[in-house]
């Protein structure tokens, strides 16, 4: 039990402290004790610093109670002189708490505003009636924060074609990934207990976004042979564009994830690791395209008289990604992005030569967060399939192939 206080408001004529803390002494406020994380231990006297990207304030439950007993409820104003803490999930610098005189606990919450330099340097002070009133108790806390990095290593191997019955896939190499990710995050300040419940639920992970803009193009070249409709007279002429191109553009930055992992790029054991370890993953982008994309053969009036096969001739991938090293909370599924690094992919895949020059690049180094991470919404892969983001048009509208209906038996 804490030592009872003299009347803090009585000045030089203050009454002597009560010998019996249970007595109803003439004190305007009780002396108080505070517990962080609602426990008397000290290893969990921690709160995570607020997340700037995306904005969030993790909170920790606390409680306060009287340990001396004035005649009535005390008005205790909680402050943090060094500005490292806030009270609740809002940006509240002080908190007024009515503390009953029966010793029962009263709940409140804290959040971290600014990271601690040392263990216990964020002190909660409990003042009587006002923020400048007499000090009735205090409690040391630590605002833990993170330092991290994201490494990206582009691959050096050529891509490959994978053929199915009706489609071809332009994919990365079998010899290694297009790009490898490595994310590391460490606790600060030194000495934070990683087994504390506020820390043990956290993991290092990777979030990846795809930038807005042109994502890919697929091009088909018209065949010199038409599949004519029944009854079309010999000598009839139709035209089709020599080349048809499918262009897909993302209107917004999007999250590069899927339904199995709607937030993190990868949730495999190597890609989601305890704080202080290295999360590893890789990306091997691919794009599937139909081997044939038939075009309608039209006469000069615009009537469709034939179908003209158009064979896949080229795929180009133009993609820019942002990889983020993040802290992932396994309980509430939120992330705190720590560092970012951009990378991109330029692929020109020529079906005729079956070569895929693979040009993956990455920024020279990582840096602080300057591109707010997208953590929800439409997945990048789904955005590429949305008809609103797809434009199919001739490469050159004036470059046409003219086909003539031959006589029966002379070929089609």
Image (spheres, helix red, strand yellow):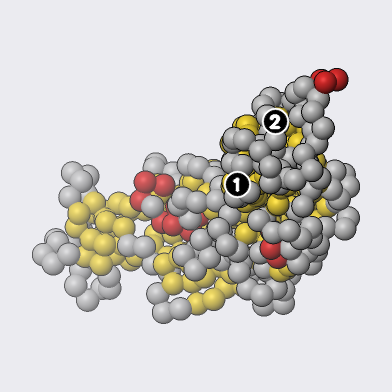
Up-down: is 115 above or below 130?
below
Instruction: Name the residue located 62 percent from the left edge and 35 percent from the top edge.
Output: 71
| Image quarter (top left, top right, bottom left or bottom right) of the C terminus | bottom left
Q: Earlier in the sequence, mark 2 or mark 1?
A: 2
Front residue of 87 and 242: 87
SS category of the residue bearing label 1: loop
Q: Is 337 situated above or below 151?
A: above
Circle 2 crowding by C-alpha within 10 Å: few under 14, some 14–19, many from 20: many
Q: At which x and y percent is residue 134?
A: 77, 28
Q: Quadrant of residue 306?
A: bottom left
Residue 26's mark?
A: 2
Res. 149 visible in picture: no
On residue 211, which mark appears? none
Could you say where residue 390 lies in the image, as x and y percent from the top left? Answer: 40, 49
SS for dot 2: loop
Q: Which mark is residue 102?
A: 1
Q: Which residue is drawn at 11% across and 64% down?
A: 231
Cβ atoms at labels 2 and 1 below 8 Å apart = no
Relative to 278, 30 lies left or right:
left
Rendering coords of residue 246 (x, y %): 43, 53
391 versus 266 height, above or below: above
Count of labels in the image: 2
Foreground of the two, 287 or 325: 325
Q: Nearer the viewer, residue 312 or 281?
A: 281
């Amino acid at each position: 039990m804490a030592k009872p206080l003299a009347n803090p408001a009585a000045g030089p004529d203050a009454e002597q402290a009560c010998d019996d803390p249970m007595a109803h002494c003439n004190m305007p406020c009780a002396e108080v004790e505070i517990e962080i994380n609602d426990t008397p231990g000290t290893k969990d006297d921690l709160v995570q610093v607020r997340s700037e990207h995306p904005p969030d304030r993790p909170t920790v439950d606390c409680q306060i109670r009287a340990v001396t007993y004035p005649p009535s409820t005390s008005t205790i104003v909680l402050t943090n002189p060094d500005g490292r803490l806030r009270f609740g999930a809002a940006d509240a610098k002080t908190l007024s708490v009515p503390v009953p005189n029966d010793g029962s606990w009263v709940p409140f919450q804290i959040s971290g505003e600014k990271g601690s330099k040392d263990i216990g340097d964020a002190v909660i002070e409990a003042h009587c009636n006002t923020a400048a009133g007499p000090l009735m108790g205090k409690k040391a806390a630590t605002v833990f924060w993170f330092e991290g990095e994201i490494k990206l290593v582009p691959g050096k191997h050529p891509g490959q074609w994978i053929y199915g019955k009706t489609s071809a896939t332009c994919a990365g190499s079998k010899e290694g990934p297009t790009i490898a990710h490595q994310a590391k995050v460490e606790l600060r300040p030194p000495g934070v207990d990683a087994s504390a419940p506020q820390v043990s639920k956290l993991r290092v992970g990777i979030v990846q976004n795809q930038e807005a803009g042109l994502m890919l193009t697929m091009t088909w070249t018209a065949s010199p042979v038409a599949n004519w409709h029944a009854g079309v007279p010999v000598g009839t002429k139709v035209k089709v564009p020599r080349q048809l191109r499918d262009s897909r553009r993302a209107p917004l930055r999007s999250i590069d994830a899927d339904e199995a992992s709607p937030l993190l790029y990868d949730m495999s054991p190597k890609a989601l690791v305890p704080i202080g370890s290295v999360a590893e993953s890789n990306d091997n982008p691919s794009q599937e395209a139909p081997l044939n994309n038939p075009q309608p053969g039209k006469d000069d009036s615009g009537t469709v008289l034939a179908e003209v096969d158009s064979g896949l001739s080229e795929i180009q991938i133009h993609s820019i990604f942002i990889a983020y090293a993040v802290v992932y909370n396994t309980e509430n599924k939120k992330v705190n992005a720590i560092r970012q690094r951009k990378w991109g992919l330029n692929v020109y895949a020529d079906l005729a030569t079956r070569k895929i020059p693979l040009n993956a690049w990455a920024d020279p180094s990582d840096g602080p967060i300057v591109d707010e991470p997208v953590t929800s919404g439409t997945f990048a892969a789904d955005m590429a399939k949305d008809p609103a983001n797809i434009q199919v048009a001739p490469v050159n509208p004036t470059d046409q192939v003219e086909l003539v209906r031959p006589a029966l038996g002379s070929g089609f």
